[in-house]
Amino acid sequence: MEQVNYGSGNNPDPQPGKADLLLALTRRCNLNCRYCFIDRRRKPADLPRKTLKLALKLLFSSSKKALSLQLFGGEPALAPALVFDAVAISRRMEAETGKRLEISLTTNLLGWSDAALRFLAKERVGILASLDGDEAAQTWRSGINLPKRDFIRMLAAARRLKRLGCRLRLNMVVAPEKVRRLHKNFIFLKTLGLGEIQAAYALAPGWTANRRLQFLKQLLKAKASGLRQDWEIEPVLTHPQIFCDCDGVVSVGCAAVLETSAPALAESFKMGNLGNFSSLDDLAGSRREQETKISRLAAQRALPRFIPEVIALGNAAKSVLGRGKVS
């Protein structure tokens, strides 16, 4: 589960001139990724259609003319009807309001029918594909005994989307245990020629001083090999992205991906239920506000140790890639 399209700086608007909503369609997943900390026991497992409509209504209530909808999970391929509904309803609202809507979907690429892939391409849905590298990297990441045929299916789905003309971006998440393979996995994905690649570090424990240093060195090596990425998005944990969960609870920040690893922080990011807000504009946050929440919990010793570690890592990555060297 990865959140994307982060804003930068302390601007209260994560994407200047654009209203952005990340919408969880399901908590179900066909993998058990090692760095995913979503509580799959929470109900409802899937987004109710009524809640879906309320969330889209909230997005289109923004005063902004440009909108971004990011469909998320769990794995959306396990709830294809919700994907179809979300895209169809939002495209209809786009036509009715005259606003400009970008739709993207995060997926591990498993479980899609060819008809669904053709639908995504036809409706101009951008795809963020969760691929961490070669077969060994993907198997380790998945947390299951991933059959070779499933890895092949992932790559086949990506190639099919590419042939269909989809905007495809690969999200390569780097776990601290596997940091020394960052460049190797980047080269593997680049050689596939499926689309742009973004590198991300796992929001997880284990980023020791040595692993942080290795991450920065590997990043520079990947940059020299063609990695292009806006590192002004960092640090991810202070990004004020608006997120709506399956139960209709709205948060500002990475609440869902922290709920079992940093529950106090996830809870502090929650703003209320969909029905509490008349406009998405009411939820605009800032990095400074997120930093204040984190600092307050840190003072209360309510945060796990890895939270400040990954914030420091994000700041270091932004600084190092800007200078082009590790000091």
Image: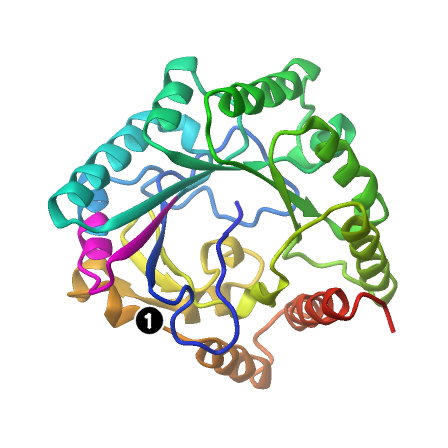
Residue at the spot x=71%, y=69% of the render?
A: 309
In the picture of the structure, the residue carrying the numbered disc 1 is 284
Q: Which three-letter amino acid code belongs to the residue tagged 1? A: Ala
Q: Position of residue 3 (x, y in %)?
A: 50, 52
Residue 196, quarter of picture: top right
Q: Position of residue 59 (x, y in %)?
A: 24, 55
Above/below status of 22 relative to 189: below
Q: Residues within 10 Å of mark 1 (few under 14, many from 20)?
A: some
Residue 206 located within the stretch drawn in magenta: no
Which residue is depicted at the point 56% across and 75% down?
A: 302
Task: Locate residue 295, reporting x and y percent.
Answer: 55, 82
Foreground pick, 165 / 307 = 165
Asked whether 325 or 30 is in front, the reply is 325
The number of numbered badges drawn on the structure is: 1
Q: Tell me: 107 left or right of 224.
A: left
Does the stretch in magenta take in 59? yes
Residue in the picture at 59% in, 23% down: 154
Q: Nearer the viewer, residue 232 or 138?
A: 232
**Residue at the spot 81% in from the left edge and 51% down from the top edge:** 224
Q: Is residue 42 left or right of residue 181?
A: left
Relative to 82, say whether 155 is above or below.
above
Secondary structure of the residue carrying tag 1 is loop
In the rendered image, residue 15, in percent from the top left (x then y), is placed at 41, 64
What residue span does the magenta drawing correspond to?
56-70
Q: Does residue 257 appear to the left or right of 135 in the view shown?
A: left
